[in-house]
């Protein structure tokens, strides 16, 4: 399979509205999935867990994460790791929206719909 080279921009990718104040877009490689999240101040938090390790990079804004029994705060440039199967949630701090980039490897099948737009890039010639 020959993968076609192409540049994308988070600002123009299809966005999925998860719930009021939360939307996301995805981008993938062969074995990794990136998910950009747009989180608005005042959004409803959603404590959850999943069997995937998650690495978070804070692009914009300030955020407070509850990860198991721990609470950590992040700002632009912060990196946060969430181990598999640990309940977690995040919420913006202050009035600025938060952009956080989640990294998952391997690709989460339940998020594969976020990257349907990329399928032509992975087709055989």
Image (cartoon, rainbow, N blue to C red):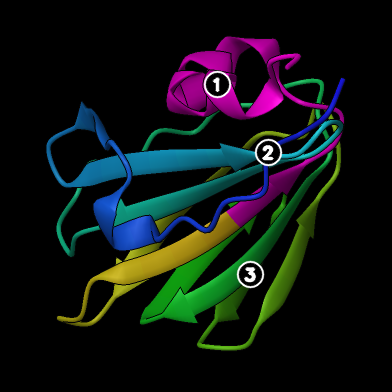
Would residue 107 be counted in the magenta stretch?
yes
> Between residues 120 and 82, which one lies in front from this camera angle?
120
Circle 2 is placed at which residue position?
4
How far is the residue under mark 2 from the one under mark 3? 27 Å
Within 10 Å of the Cα at label 2, are there few (<14), some (14-19), or many (20+) other Cα atoms? few
Circle 3 is placed at which residue position?
57
Q: Secondary structure at mark 3?
A: strand
Query: Along the horizontal axis of the image, is 91 left or right of 23?
Result: right
How far is the residue under mark 2 from the one under mark 1? 8 Å
User: Which residue shows up at 85% across the image and 36% down it?
Assistant: 105
Q: Which residues are magenta?
A: 102-125
Circle 1 is placed at which residue position?
120
x and y percentages locating residue 120 in the rendered image: 55, 21
User: Which residue shows up at 48% across the image and 69% down it?
Assistant: 64
Q: Quarter-wise, where is residue 52 in the image?
A: top right
Q: Are marks 3 and 1 in contact (CB under 8 Å)?
A: no
How far is the residue under mark 3 from the one under mark 1? 28 Å
Indicate which label's residue lies in the foreground, 3 or 1. 1
> Between residues 67 and 83, which one lies in front from this camera angle?
83
x and y percentages locating residue 61 in the rendered image: 36, 82
Q: Quadrant of the N terminus?
A: top right
User: Which residue shows up at 46% across the image and 52% down it?
Assistant: 36
The earlier-in-sequence mark between 3 and 1 is 3
User: Which residue shows up at 57% across the image and 51% down it?
Assistant: 6
* The residue positioned farthest toward the front in the image shown: 125
Q: How many marks?
A: 3
């Amino acid at each position: 399979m020959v993968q076609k080279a192409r540049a994308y921009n988070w600002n123009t990718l299809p966005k999925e509205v998860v719930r009021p104040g939360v939307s996301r877009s995805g981008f993938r490689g062969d074995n990794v999935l990136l998910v950009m999240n747009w989180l608005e101040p005042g959004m409803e938090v959603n404590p959850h867990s999943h069997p995937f390790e998650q690495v978070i990079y804070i692009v914009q804004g300030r955020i407070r994460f509850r990860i198991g029994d721990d609470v950590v705060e992040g700002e632009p440039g912060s990196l946060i790791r969430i181990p598999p199967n640990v309940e977690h949630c995040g919420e913006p701090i202050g009035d600025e929206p938060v952009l956080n980039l989640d990294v998952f490897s391997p690709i989460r099948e339940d998020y594969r719909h976020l990257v349907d737009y990329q399928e032509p890039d992975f087709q055989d010639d």
